[in-house]
Structure formats: structure tokens, C-alpha cells
Amino acid sequence: MTKLPMTAAGYAALADELRHRIRVERPDLVQRIQQAIADDPNLVENSEYQVALAEQNVNETRVAELEDKLARADIVDVSKLSGNTIKFGATVTLIDEDTGKKRVWQIVGEPEADASKGKISITSPIARALIGKSKGETVVVETPGGAKAFALRQVEWSEAKRKRREQV
């Protein structure tokens, strides 16, 4: 069984989604299916039944996926990590050397990656280019639009510290 590295926050988010799907969505879908059957017992032509059944299949597939990911989770305690060398869990501040634009990324496990929230998968091209590098270095990342150079300005390990710094 292949372990999936993830942060404690990522594990908690997946566990919350699983709980919601089992406790809220599953009973709601069962009720919708039962209501659709009561309204029209001809299941072949009952569109409400077909839609609810399809949604139930999607929900159950996601439940199974979440259970698998949680069972294989290898939780990394980011608060115990330190140093200027980038590895899993690091929050990295980069400056695009072409545009001067600042980007902040946390390197996380695949199940919790969400670029819109500043979390990139350890398997992403940018994370792979960053791993092993240190604060002050320049990193070149191959992107679909060509090579991009980034200056590494900051390496942090605690989500709480990063949030405090952003509030100042």
C-alpha cells in the first residue's frame, strides 16, 4: 500500500469531506431516490430517479476514494520541520524574475493540492524544481510557455507563522 504524504490540515479537510458525504449527502440522496420512486414507479422513464441515482453513484465513488486516501495517509507534522532547504510541507515565497510578481506556495500532498489556495502538489513541476533548493537561490521551472526563473525569498514551515506574517 503506497503511502500518501499530507499535512495534518489536509488530512482534516479530507476527513471533514468524508464525514459530510456520509452523514449529509448519502441520506439526502437516499431520500431523493425514495421520493422519486414514490412519485413515479416507472424507473426507466423517471428522470428524477435517474439523476438522483447518478448523483448517488458519484457520491459513493468519492466516499470510497476518500476512505482510500485517508487509510494511506502519511501525516507530516510541518510544525516540527525547519531550515532553509525546501522539502515537503514548506511554504515558499518566490519572486518571478521576469515580472517581479510574488507567489507564495505550500508544498503539500496530491490529495490536498489546490493552487487557488496556494497549495501545490509535491508532484507538480514547480514543486519538483523547488525540492532541495534553499533560500536565496534561483530556480528555473519548465512550464508549457517555456522556462521561468524564480528567486527564492523565503522558506517557512508553520502555517500559523505564515498567516501571522500576512496579517502584519
Image (tube, helix red, strand yellow):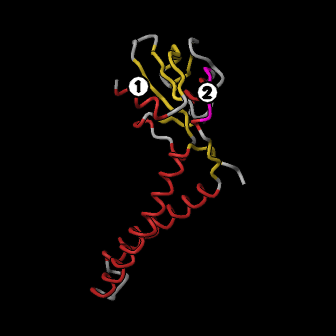
As drawn, 8 above or below 150: below
Residue most extreme to the right: 1
- The residue stretch that appears in magenta: 80-84
Q: Residue at x 50, y 57 (%)?
A: 15
For label 2, the residue is 82
Where is residue 109, by image quadrant?
top right
Q: Mark 1 or mark 2: name the one nearer the start of the chain.
A: 2
Q: Secondary structure at mark 1?
A: helix
Q: Label 2 sits on what residue type?
A: Ser
Quick one: 11 or 27, which is closer to the camera?
11
Q: CA distance from mark 1 to mark 2?
A: 17 Å
Residue most extreme to the left: 39
Contact between labelled residues 2 and 1, with CB atoms less than 8 Å apart: no
Residue 2 included in the magenta stretch of the image: no
As drawn, 150 above or below 8: above
Q: Secondary structure at mark 2?
A: loop
Q: What quarter of the picture does the C terminus occupy?
A: top left
Tag shown at residue 165? 1
As drawn, 136 above or below 35: above
Whether residue 69 is visible, yes or no, is yes
Whether residue 149 is visible, yes or no, is no
